[in-house]
Image (cartoon, grey):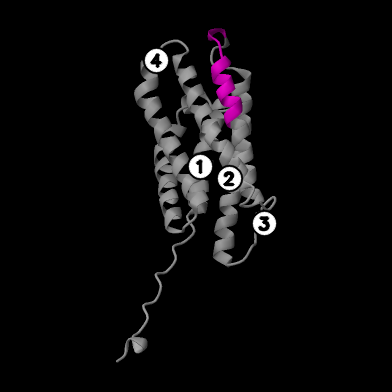
Amino acid sequence: MSTDDAPVAAPAPAIADPAPLGLAGFALTTFLLSVVNAHWATSSSGSAWLGYAFAYGGLAQLLAGMWEFRNRNVFGATAFSTYGGFWIGLYLWVQDVAPHTTGLEANRDLGWILLAFAIFNTYMLIISTQVNTAVFVVFLTLEITEILLFIGQFTISASDGGTDALIKIGGIVGVITALAAWYTSAAGVMNGVKGKQVFPVGKPLFDL
């Protein structure tokens, strides 16, 4: 048999789109923390987000980012891996660092963390204009959330008692961010199941 007649190996099957999982993990954890920041959650449920920050928003989203590398989706891989790392890092900070701070040190530390991720989110927001409208809305509302929260953490004073208005507003915008991410996740699942667009996600905002 000549080499021309040799059977050609079938290409490896593509993996399922991991983006809906990453968005769902991000949405749920953002929602749980945001209702705390908005002071909608009671004191007894104020730490409900913490375990999910590690397991769902963190680990599951990080895995989605790794699978996006397999999908050759550099945007999704970077976004999900980074925010998966954010939630794992935030969990570790709350567990291991924050309890050892005094006064407003924890607020200032958190302000710097949020500022750093707002810088990352700024260029991802710009690049999201090339993905679709739904993804852009997620990054836009997240940008506003992070800006409000890091300014709130930097400007909060001891007399505020942890109830700074900017943090509350950031929590409300965070809930909107979570809803936008949940919708985008749901659209990815439904459109993937049906093999066509059922839930619209829009087009890129403009072409570079």
- In three-dimensional space, the C-alpha distance between marks 4 and 1, rounded to whole angstroms, equals 27 Å
- In three-dimensional space, the C-alpha distance between marks 4 and 3, rounded to whole angstroms, equals 46 Å
Element on which disc 1 rests: helix
Q: CB atoms at circles 4 and 1 under 8 Å apart?
A: no
Which residue in the structure is indicated by mark 2?
181
Badge 2 local density, few (<14 within 10 Å), some, or many (20+)?
many
**Residue 125 among those drawn in magenta:** no
Which residue in the structure is indicated by mark 4?
101
Residue 122 or residue 182, whichever sits in front: 122
Q: CB atoms at circles 4 and 3 under 8 Å apart?
A: no
Badge 1 local density, few (<14 within 10 Å), some, or many (20+)?
many
- In three-dimensional space, the C-alpha distance between marks 2 and 1, rounded to whole angstroms, equals 7 Å
Counting residues from the start of the chain, the first of labels 4 and 1 encountered is 1
Which residue in the structure is indicated by mark 3?
200
Counting residues from the start of the chain, the first of labels 3 and 2 encountered is 2
Q: Amino acid at mark 1?
A: Phe
Element on which disc 2 rests: helix
The answer to which quarter of the image holds residue 190 is bottom right
Counting residues from the start of the chain, the first of labels 1 and 3 encountered is 1
Q: CB atoms at circles 4 and 2 under 8 Å apart?
A: no
Q: Which mark is residue 26?
A: 1
Counting residues from the start of the chain, the first of labels 4 and 3 encountered is 4
Span shown in magenta: 146-159
Q: Amino acid at mark 2?
A: Ala
Which residue is rendered at x = 36% and y = 16% of the image?
A: 100
Which residue sits furthest top? 159
